[in-house]
Image: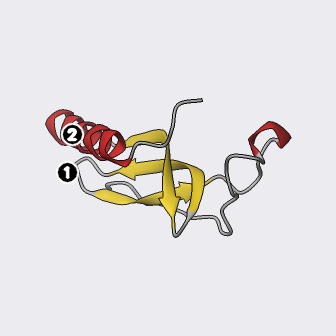
Amino acid sequence: MPLHDPAFLERAWATAAAAARSAQVAVVLGTERRVSQELRITAMVVQPDGTIAGWQDKVQLDPSEDGTFSPGTERQLFRVAP
């Protein structure tokens, strides 16, 4: 598995947000991110205007993910455009 690359992820998130804004659509993007010192599998939620609505961390990991990722601790609900 490739090493966690924050710079790559920041560019990818910005690209996804710009594409959402350009197409005026919401995006739910599967990705990973660091929370404190923990690496988490997450979904980035982007509004049609390109703003990041938030993140939903995976709370139930597959046993194969246990050694690399930490589970999230809560579930989010996102409202996207009217």
Tell me the residue that label 2 is attached to: 24
Q: Which mark is residue 32?
A: none
Q: Residue 80 is drawn in which quadrant?
A: bottom left
Q: Is residue 38 toward the left or the right of residue 6 in the image?
A: right
**Screen quadrant of the N terminus:** top right
Instruction: Give the image location of residue 21, x and y in percent.
Output: 18, 42
Say what amino acid the circle numbered 1 marks.
Answer: Asp
Q: Residue at x 50, y 58 (%)?
A: 34
Q: Residue at x 44, y 39 (%)?
A: 29
Tell me the residue that label 1 is attached to: 49
Instruction: Give the image location of residue 45, x and y in percent.
Output: 41, 51
Quick one: which residue is furthest to the top in this view?
1
C-alpha gap between disc 1 and disc 2:
6 Å
Label 1 Cα crowd, 10 Å radius (few <14 / some 14-19 / many 20+): some
Q: Which of the two residues, 12 or 5, is positioned nearer the viewer here? A: 5
Question: Does 65 appear above or below 52?
Answer: above
Q: Which of the two residues, 40 or 76, is positioned nearer the viewer here? A: 40
Labels 1 and 2: the sequence-earlier one? 2
Q: Is residue 10 toward the left or the right of residue 79 in the image?
A: left
Secondary structure, mark 2, is: loop
Say what amino acid the circle numbered 2 marks.
Answer: Gln
Quick one: which residue is furthest to the right in this view?
63
Say whether marks 1 and 2 touch (CB < 8 Å): yes
Secondary structure, mark 1, is: loop
Question: Does 2 appear above or below 24?
Answer: above
Q: Which of the two residues, 41 or 28, is positioned nearer the viewer here? A: 41
Quick one: which residue is furthest to the front in this view?
3
Q: Residue at x 43, y 49 (%)?
A: 44
Instruction: Give the image location of residue 42, x and y in percent.
Output: 55, 49
**Screen quadrant of the C terminus:** bottom left
Question: Does 19 appear above or below 41?
Answer: above
